Image (cartoon, grey):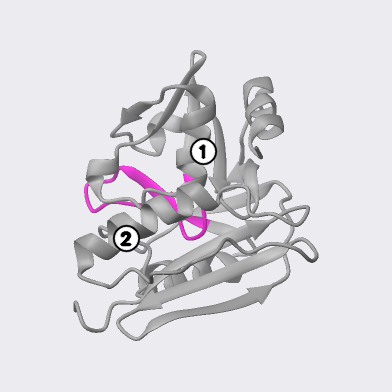
Amino acid sequence: MRHTTTLIETIRIRNGTAPLWYLHIRRLATSCKALGVPLPGELPPPEGGSDRVYRLEVGMRGAHASERLVGPADPVKLIVSRVAHHPYPHKTTDRSQFERALDSARGAEADDALLLTPGGFVAETAIYSVFWWENGTLCAPALDIGILPGVGRARVIEIAGKVEERRTSWKELRGVSVFLVNSVRGVVKVSAVQDDAVPSSTQTDDLAARFWP
């Protein structure tokens, strides 16, 4: 595995800069050390040009970059996936569980799928990290269940100052204001899960307004 692992960072470029580059590099360095992948010596931050997504892949043979357009950040409709979540502590190209979950979501006319651990705890979606509000307290799945330490998640915690990590079933979150985040689209609201409407929150609006440095 050490010799085939390829790490990914998907980096948003806004107004000619990569505002979350420091968080991407921090995560990449941690994952390279953990998985035995050499960290390339020179990785200047991408800059200039139009708003876009810069995808950086780093493996045993070095680094490769590509670019694509930024997709919409409209409110997301979720299904609860039948694909169980298995630990994904590093962002690698081995994303088959998320690809299967996303295919199922799109087949059900949803935008994304919420994956649960084999024990039934809320983990993450195929594309986003998950947060919610409980009586004004910002909460998120515990990292030690094996979720990705997302760059968007790190940025939200940086803004908010703290987060309560929880092991929570989806049933416990019904009627709670849930939102999503990733490093490309920022903070994104959830419109519904399994056709159950999700309430919005002004606290989420505040985080969204402050997300980009």
Please state if 188 lies on the left or on the right of 128 as rendered: right
Magenta span covers which residues?
Answer: 113-129
Residue 155, numbered label: 1
Asked whether 55 falls inside the magenta stretch, the response is no
- Gap between marks 2 and 1, in whole Å? 17 Å
Q: Is 197 or 43 nearer to us in this picture?
A: 43
Q: How many numbered marks are there?
A: 2
Q: Is 94 or 23 nearer to us in this picture?
A: 23
Where residue 37 appears, as percent x and y from the top left, is 26, 72
Asked whether 117 falls inside the magenta stretch, the response is yes
Q: Are marks 2 and 1 in contact (CB under 8 Å)?
A: no
The residue lying at 49 percent from left, 67 percent from top is 43
The residue lying at 30 percent from left, 42 percent from top is 121
Can residue 174 be seen at all in this image of the molecule?
A: no
Quadrant of the rendering where the C terminus is positioned: top right
Q: Quadrant of residue 197?
A: top right
First reached walking from the N terminus: tag 2 or tag 1: 2
Q: What amino acid is labelled 1 in the image?
A: Arg
Residue 90, numbered label: 2
Can residue 11 be seen at all in this image of the molecule?
A: yes
**At numbered mark 2, what does the secondary structure look like: helix, strand or loop?**
loop
Where residue 74 appears, as percent x and y from the top left, is 74, 50
The residue lying at 37 percent from left, 59 percent from top is 28
Asked if 209 appears above or below 120 in the picture, the reply is above
Please state if 49 lies on the left or on the right of 46 as rendered: right
Where residue 7 appears, as percent x and y from the top left, is 37, 70
For disc 2, the neighbor class at 10 Å (few under 14, some 14 to 19, many from 20) is many
Asked if 3 appears above or below 95 in the picture, the reply is below
